[in-house]
Every structure is written in structure tokens, then in C-alpha cells.
Amino acid sequence: MQGFDYPLVIAGIVVIALATSSTCAYLWLQLKSQTRRVNRLEHLFNKELTVMTQSQAAMGKRIIDVENMKAEVSSKPSQSESSVIEDQSESEFNFQEKLHSGSYNSALNLLKKGMSSDDVAKRCGLSKAEASLMQLVNNKSPVDH
């Protein structure tokens, strides 16, 4: 039997040990690089989370402020409702007054004669909106068959 060539075996073991050490060193460097990358991503994530948390808190505060304003407005309906009712009553009174005084009839006659709605409003004591509406209605008369 032949004997083992110890220097050759030792050289093989050394090559395997060097290859294993190189692989371990490479993997360690990769692990270190990945760890730095994960740490950077974690830092960015924490910043984003902080921004989102702060914006949610601000939005919550705004919602509470709006709810408080809504409650404040709801607790004072008498003032706004009474002004709306007064406005409605006043406009009904104005309509009745204009109807009985003949303002609408005069306005209609002037519009039929071709006077502008602004001039009719001034002359008959109507609002520009009323005179314009009357002019629109007057211009859309049914076609004779």
C-alpha cells in the first residue's frame, strides 16, 4: 500500500479552508451591507410614520374644530331661521304689493314694446332678476298654429 501524500492532503485542506474563509468573508460583507440598507429603510419608514401620525393628529383636531363649530351654529338656529323667515315674509309682501300696484303689468307691457329688462326694472321698481325673468318668459311665448 502506498502511503498518503501528506503535503498534498494538507494543501487541499488549506485550499478548502481558504475557500471557506473567503466565502464566509464575502457573506459577512453582504450581511453587513444588507444590515445598513435595512437600517436606512427603517429610518425612512420611521420618518414617514411620524409624518403620517402628525398629519392624522392635525386632521383629527380639524375634525373636532369643525364639529365644535357645527354644534355652535346648531345651538343658535333662532337667529338665522328668523332672518330667513323675515326675508320670506318680506318677499311675499313685496310680491303682493307689486302685483296689486300693477308693476308687473306695466313691466310686461314695456317689455313687449321692446324696452330692456334693466330699464324696465328701474322704471317699475322691480329687481333686475324679476325683469329678466319676465323678459325670458315673454320671449318664449307659444307659437301660433
Image (cartoon, rainbow, N blue to C red):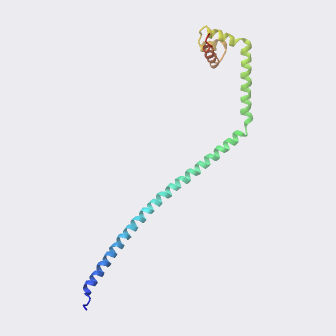
Would residue 136 be found to the left or right of residue 29 on screen?
A: right
Where's residue 107, x and y in %? 65, 11
At horizontal 61% and vertical 15% (from top left) the residue drawn is 140
Please state, as top left, top right, bottom left or bottom right, where the N terminus lies in the image.
bottom left
Placement of 107 over or under 129, stated as above or below: above
Placement of 55 over or under 12, stated as above or below: above
At horizontal 31% and vertical 77% (from top left) the residue drawn is 18
Q: Quadrant of residue 109?
A: top right
Q: Nearer the viewer, residue 19 or 37?
A: 19
Would residue 135 be found to the left or right of residue 84 on screen?
A: left
Placement of 21 over or under 61, stated as above or below: below
Where's residue 102, x and y in %? 71, 11
Please state, as top left, top right, bottom left or bottom right, where the C terminus lies in the image.
top right
Would residue 38 be found to the left or right of residue 91 on screen?
A: left
Residue lying furthest top in this view?
113
Placement of 101 over or under 90, stated as above or below: above
Q: Quadrant of residue 91?
A: top right
At horizontal 72% and vertical 18% (from top left) the residue drawn is 95
